[in-house]
Amino acid sequence: MDKVIGDLAKKRPLKFSPSAIAEIKRLYKLEEDGRILFVGVKDGGCSGFTYVFEFKQASPNQTVYTIDDIQLTMNKEDLQYINNLSIDYEQGLNNRGFTFENPNADTTCGCGTSFS
């Protein structure tokens, strides 16, 4: 398991759409110095796991990545659930916010923020 996680950490684990990049960069300007984007998962939601997408201080056990000029961090153990995750930002009348397309998810809920 550690080798698999190690191999995933060497690759580009996330993909951002141009609109997601623009919104994350806008949000970075509002953040305190030293906080970076954290992307991960936690138990919860209606399907078993839910995405974590927030700004916080990086801890020593997290890998820091720079993807599309965005600095972010993740827990190594989350990589198995979110490797190749595509993140978009929608600004439509019906939907506004970040959306996630996860090739590792067997099922997702209707709101799009929970998966198993």
Image (cartoon, rainbow, N blue to C red):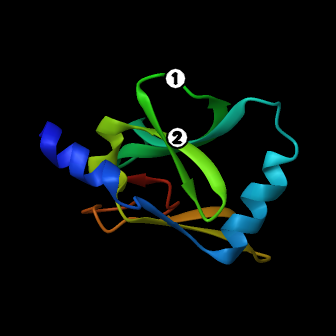
Amino acid at the residue labelled 2:
Thr
Vertical position of residue 97 compared to residue 43: above or below: below
Question: What is the x, y in percent for residue 68?
Answer: 61, 65
Graded by Cα atoms within 10 Å as few (under 14), some (14 to 19) or many (20 or more), the crowding at tag 1 reads few
In this view, 112 is above or below 40: below
Residue at image point 77% right, 67% down: 22
In this picture, residue 62 sits left or right of residue 81? right
Q: Which residue is mark 1?
A: 59
What's the mark number on residue 20? none
Q: Nearer the viewer, residue 6 or 84?
A: 6
Residue 58: give x, y in percent of width and height. 57, 28
Measured from the top left, where is residue 14 in percent x and y?
A: 46, 61
Spatial CA distance of label 1 from label 2 is 9 Å
Judged from this view, the residue extending furthest toward the right is 30
The quarter of the rendered structure image containing the N terminus is: top left
Quarter of the view holding residue 16? bottom right
Label 1, secondary structure: give it: loop
Q: Is residue 96 left or right of residue 98?
A: right
Q: Nearer the viewer, residue 22 or 89?
A: 22
Q: Residue at x 26, y 49 (%)?
A: 80
Q: Is residue 60 visible?
A: yes
* Amino acid type assigned to the residue bearing label 1 in the image: Ser
Q: Residue at x 80, y 76 (%)?
A: 93
Q: In the image, is residue 63 above or below residue 17?
A: above
Q: Quadrant of residue 48?
A: top left
**Does residue 81 show up?**
no
Disc number at residue 73?
A: 2
- For the point 71% across and 73% down, the residue is 19
Question: Is 80 on the left or on the right of 92, as rendered?
Answer: left
Could you say whether the residue bearing mark 2 is in a helix, strand or loop?
A: strand
Callout 1–callout 2 Cβ contact below 8 Å: yes
Image location (x, y in percent) of residue 34: 73, 29
